[in-house]
Amino acid sequence: MKSYRITLIPGDGVGPELAETTRACLEATGVKFDWDIQTAGLDVMESEGTPLPERVVESIRRNKVAIKAPITTPVGKGFRSVNVALRKELDLYACLRPCKSYDGVRSRYKDIDLVIVRENTEDLYAGIEFQKGTAEALQLLKEIDRLSARKIREDSGISIKPISVAGTERIVKFAFDYARQNKRKKVTAVHKANIMKFSDGLFLEVSREVAKQYPDIEFEDRIVDNMCMQLVQKPEAYDVLVLPNLYGDILSDLCAGLVGGLGVAPGANIGTSGALFEATHGSAPKYKGLNKVNPTAMILSGVLMLKHLGETQAAERLEKAVSDVIREGREVTYDLKTDRSDPSAAGTREMGQAIIRKMK
């Protein structure tokens, strides 16, 4: 039987608990794995001087596939996001965020089945910024004033929003290819081209051109603020959404909210030469070591990984087991109980063991 060499990043905070439970569930599918365990995050920062040692990046480059537990990013201080760094280092240009309803998860909505495809490398998240008052910022302001005759206040910080033809082509093609491979019917491009005519306008123009190559898939576009309203009013009208980086970040959390929150929201970051699968929630350091946090998002990220590897039957078995355990509502973590203080709530490991039993 084939064995897959996979980079496993246990993360920090509650990450190691989630990683161990997910690993057990993946192994219980019968698929063989050869785990290349690589530590990263806060603890590694203290011992190695960086939260993302080069050995981690090289491991993913070598193995082509990785699964990662949450890693802490301090707000307003410390190092920049490990997630962002990995996307840039490995050119993981497509962020895939399925948002699907599961019976037993509290939500205002039912039967949601949306997929967010977010461009991961461009837009305002490209990291091209100039701090207020610096010589570089003041020089840029003068140049903008000269080129556009639009005066910007001198006490401004500046972020640049690049949207390219090449970057847009590949993310929109990814969305259409995903739709075709997964028997989806429609792709919706989301933008603000009515205002940002040369960046979002380019995204829309290229999206329309790419759509012509996929006559079997319906195509439409929506302005981003209208899209937010539409998703709240009638999410069932949408299927695959493709978006520039910033809008994709925002709407993927909105869609996760439609199905019960980040605790049931898996994620994947995919490029031409590698793929990284991860839960979309944070590391919840206050719960570290308490065996309390819901493992669903990371286990479902493992389901995405199995599909990526071509292990479709194993992926379907694991997802069904997760769905069955959540629907029954007995051996689930506190956040999936009707009463969050229910003393019968299962721990992280115990919920994982219940999922494994469902596959036997």
Image (cartoon, rainbow, N blue to C red):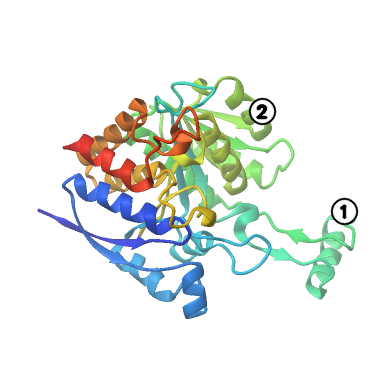
Drawn side of residue 122 relative to residue 278, left or right: right
Q: Position of residue 355 (x, y in %)?
A: 27, 39
Lower position in the chain sequence, tag 1 or tag 2 = 1
Nearer the observer: mark 1 or 2; the answer is 2
Q: Position of residue 109 (x, y in %)?
A: 51, 22
The quarter of the picture where residue 230 lies is top right
Q: Position of residue 121 (x, y in %)?
A: 54, 56
Residue 226 shows which numbered tag? 2
Residue 96 shows which numbered tag? none
Drawn side of residue 25 relative to residue 223, left or right: left
Asked whether 111 or 282 is in front, the reply is 282
- Residue 115 visible? The answer is no
Q: For numbered disc 1, what is the local secondary structure?
A: loop
Image quarter in which the C terminus is found: top left
Q: Residue at x 32, y 32 (%)?
A: 325
The image shows residue 109, relative to residue 135, as above or below, that is: above
The image shows residue 185, relative to residue 15, as above or below, that is: above
Asked whether 113 or 17 is in front, the reply is 17
Asked whether 321 or 93 is in front, the reply is 321
- Residue 48 visible? The answer is yes
Residue 150 shows which numbered tag? 1
Mark 1 surroundings: few (<14), some (14-19) or many (≥20) residues within 10 A: few
In the rendered image, the residue lying farthest to the front is: 343
Q: Residue at x 44, y 29 (%)?
A: 105
Q: For numbered disc 2, what is the local secondary structure?
A: helix
